[in-house]
Image (tube, coloured by chain):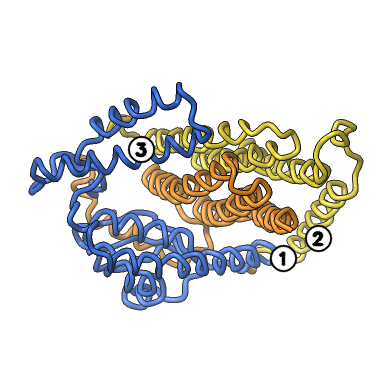
Amino acid sequence: MSAFGRRGRIRWAIGAAALLAALGAIAFGPLPSLSRAGPAFAPFFIRCLYALVLCLVLCLYRILRGPTVPDRAVAIDIMGIVVVGFCAVLCVPTGQEWYIDIGIAWALQSFIATLALAKYLEGKPLDE
Amino acid sequence: MRFARGGGRGAPGVSAGGGMKSRLILFVLGLAVWAVLTWPPTARACLFGPPASLLAALLAGEMFVRRPYALKDPMRYAYFALYLPLFVWECVKGNIHVARLICHPDLPINPGIVKVRTRLKSETGLAFLDCSITLTPGTMTVDTDPDGGFIYVHWIDVKAVDVDGATRRIVDIFERILVRIFE
Amino acid sequence: MNEILGMASIVVGLAFELFGCLGLVRLPDVYNRLQAATKCVTLGTCGIMFGVFLTFGPTAAGLKALLCIFFVVLTAPVSAHAIARAAHRSGVRLCPGSVVDRYEEDMAARGGDSGSAG
């Protein structure tokens, strides 16, 4: 789009640099000490959790900033799906398999919540 | 305006036998999901699972499967097996396309809502087509109009504005197979 | 071996998930955001789940991960569709660079009965 000009390029460069810096910090940064006790690949999964937290922060930006209500609804829906992935990854380094049950329950409940939110946005009663 | 969508109560032409079959299929499916969820089967899980799925089956009733005879045709399963790899491939292609758009510094998007025509009539088929369109390159279903057989699709990079051109580019690859499965 | 494959799958899933959330931030209006976010985040979560399944093997947790893929693929397009329809009906227009809006035209053409049947 031509609406983005030189300023758009500069903003893109700044954003890309920030994102790469964050990814670098995730990939090579320090780990909490509890990860050394877990199974063999635990540090990798902890870094995955950090990356998912970065995704959640991006969603949170859209929830706080979103100019319209549907924008926020979209961000909340996506955040629900990211949290499901978070729960699934979480059960590998901790060894607690019930985290994935939380993920399944979260997926279904977030789906229902999104449908209810959509009905509310349309201005209809919830039982239609 | 009200586009009639799924979950229509009291569909005409559903006999009592159809309702029973629908409940039975739903009961078996519910039991299967319950078994996966509580996999090492304990006594408590076995005690609560069948009544819960029975309750769900009785409540949902004949809304779940409208035409039980359609489930007996083996060709439909064969086409479904053919459909899955196509769907996964299109899904991956769509994701790479969108990822490229997002990373591009100028955001080269050209969005719009176009109208496409579909030959599918059954609600299950329409729902599958909607989901497939949503997960494939650059397109997303906004609304369906089953009476006229139209679907309104948001397209992130519009290449054809008219109904026929958009239909050829968006719907045809899926519809060819979905007609065989669901009609 | 399975663990290596699982980790590769998880990395691919994470990359797509990041792209999806980035699209949520960068793209200009609700519909475009919904497109990018739904597609990329769904495939990303499926990749992560499949990686977790490969890591666990066919145990209880692995089967649950597969079931979770099934749920996410089934529910994500439906909720995207619901939000898009609701956004359009609640009066959110397409962004200024858009080409065409057939839905708007048809709704305006049939607008007479919108109040009665709702």
Mark 1 vs 2: CB contact within 8 A: yes
Q: CA distance from mark 1 to mark 2?
A: 8 Å
Q: Which residue is mark 1?
A: B105
Is C48 placed above or below A2 here?
above
Q: Is residue A67 left or right of residue B83?
A: right
Q: Is residue B138 visible?
A: no
Quadrant into which the N terminus of chain A falls: bottom right
Q: Which residue is mark 3?
A: B30
Report the chain holding disc 2: A
Q: Which chain is blue?
A: B
B8 or B28, which lies in front? B28
Q: Both on one chain, marks 1 and 2?
A: no
Given the image, on which type of amino acid does mark 1 rest?
Answer: Pro
Q: CA distance from mark 2 to mark 3?
A: 51 Å
Given the image, on which type of amino acid does mark 2 rest?
Answer: Ala
Q: Is residue C50 left or right of residue A68?
A: right
**Label 1's element?**
loop
Look at the image and give the colour of chain A.
yellow
Residue A13's tag is 2
Is label 2 or label 3 in front?
A: 3
Give the residue at x 49% y 26%. Answer: B42
Q: Earlier in the sequence, mark 1 or mark 3?
A: 3
Look at the image and give the colour of chain C.
orange
Q: Callout 1: few (<14), some (14-19), or many (20+) C-alpha neighbours within 10 Å?
A: some
